[in-house]
Image (cartoon, rainbow, N blue to C red):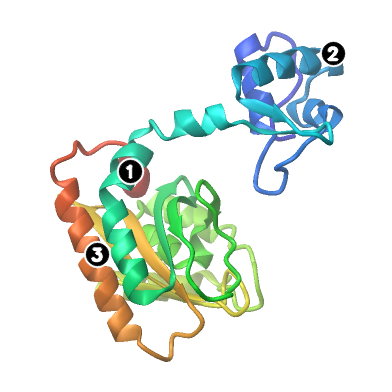
């Protein structure tokens, strides 16, 4: 269960956090019974704590009677260094890149063995885009993820290699093939995917450095890699370099720790 067990001795705080942890990308709306089950709590306990979380603004009750994550958590999340510092600095460069390419633009950092999307500007095409701000997607199946994985510590890479989930028929699930790709990422300075996260969508991404340390990845989603790849790589690198220069004035916190381990 997402929120952990219902073992005796759990504090009120851990039980409340278990309720929040019951939500994930596949469970964005939950009824009270489902919340209690996923958090490993008795229904009366869950009912009382959910009431407190709604009063605080951490959860919101919909008209249908189920629960969703509340705006208060979003507001608090924006105060985290990886959100407030990196996102604020990168924003003008993302807008310039979006204006130049008209493609969907992503900014992501590594959160354990996932790519955490801290910003996204939607492109003008109708490509299938599965990312949202705050979503966590597989490192091995996304352009920004491959960049972050290539620069991750060896133990993180090995952990990812043990669970190469197939998202589409084109997702790379062979450790040897992925290792060779990551070697090229380190050599060439950019990564790409071809319908590995969503059919009909390809991506290109480059690293963002803060004082020679990879702290994030910047990418675009396009319908094909056959056209304009050199131009897209060049545009991404210019934007990433601009973000990196701006980051030199900030302390190396949050994003750097997540991205480089």
Q: Nearer the viewer, residue 228 or 146?
A: 228
State whether residue 11 appears in this view: no
Vertical side of 151 occupied by 123: above or below: below
Q: Picture coordinates of residue 220 (x, y %)?
A: 41, 70
Q: Which circle marks residue 44 in the picture?
A: 2
Question: Which residue is rendered at x = 47% and y = 69% of the image?
Answer: 123
Sequence-first disc among 1 and 3: 3
Residue under label 3: 239
Sequence-first disc among 2 and 1: 2
Q: Quadrant of residue 51?
A: top right
Q: Quadrant of residue 183?
A: bottom left
Asked which secondary structure carries label 1, the reply is helix
Quarter of the rendering occupied by the N terminus? top right
Q: Which circle marks residue 95 in the picture?
A: none
Q: Picture coordinates of residue 172 (x, y %)?
A: 55, 73
Q: Nearer the viewer, residue 91 or 63?
A: 63
Q: In the visual, does 165 lie left or right of 39? A: left
State the CA–CA distance, disc 3 to disc 2: 52 Å
State whether residue 106 appears in this view: yes
Vertical side of 37 occupied by 191: above or below: below
State the CA–CA distance, disc 2 to disc 1: 39 Å
Asked which secondary structure carries label 3, the reply is helix
State the CA–CA distance, disc 1 to disc 3: 17 Å
Q: Picture coordinates of residue 151 (x, y %)?
A: 32, 58
Dot 2 and dot 1 residues touching (CB under 8 Å): no
Q: Which circle marks residue 255 in the picture?
A: 1
Depth check, mark 3 against mark 2: the one in front is 3
């Amino acid at each position: 269960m997402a929120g952990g067990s219902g073992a005796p001795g759990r504090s009120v705080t851990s039980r409340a956090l278990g309720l929040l942890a019951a939500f994930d990308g596949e469970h964005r709306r939950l009824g009270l019974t489902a919340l209690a089950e996923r958090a490993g709590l008795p229904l009366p306990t869950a009912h009382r704590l959910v009431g407190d979380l709604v009063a605080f603004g951490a959860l919101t009750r919909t008209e249908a009677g189920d629960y969703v994550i509340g705006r208060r958590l979003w507001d608090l999340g924006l105060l985290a260094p990886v959100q407030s510092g990196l996102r604020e600095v990168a924003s003008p460069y993302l807008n310039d890149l979006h204006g130049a390419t008209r493609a969907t633009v992503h900014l992501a950092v590594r959160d354990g063995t996932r790519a955490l999307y801290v910003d996204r500007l939607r492109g003008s095409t109708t490509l299938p885009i599965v990312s949202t701000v705050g979503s966590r997607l597989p490192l091995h199946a996304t352009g920004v993820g491959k960049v972050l994985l290539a620069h991750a510590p060896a133990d993180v890479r090995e952990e990812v290699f043990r669970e190469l989930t197939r998202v589409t028929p084109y997702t790379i699930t062979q450790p040897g093939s992925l290792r060779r790709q990551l070697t090229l990422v380190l050599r060439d300075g950019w990564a790409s995917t071809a319908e590995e996260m969503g059919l009909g969508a390809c991506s290109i991404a480059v690293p963002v450095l803060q004082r020679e340390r990879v702290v994030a990845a910047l990418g675009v989603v396009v319908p094909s890699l056959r056209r304009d790849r050199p131009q897209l790589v060049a545009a991404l690198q210019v934007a990433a370099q601009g973000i990196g220069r701006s980051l030199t004035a900030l302390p190396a916190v949050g994003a750097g720790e997540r991205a480089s381990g």
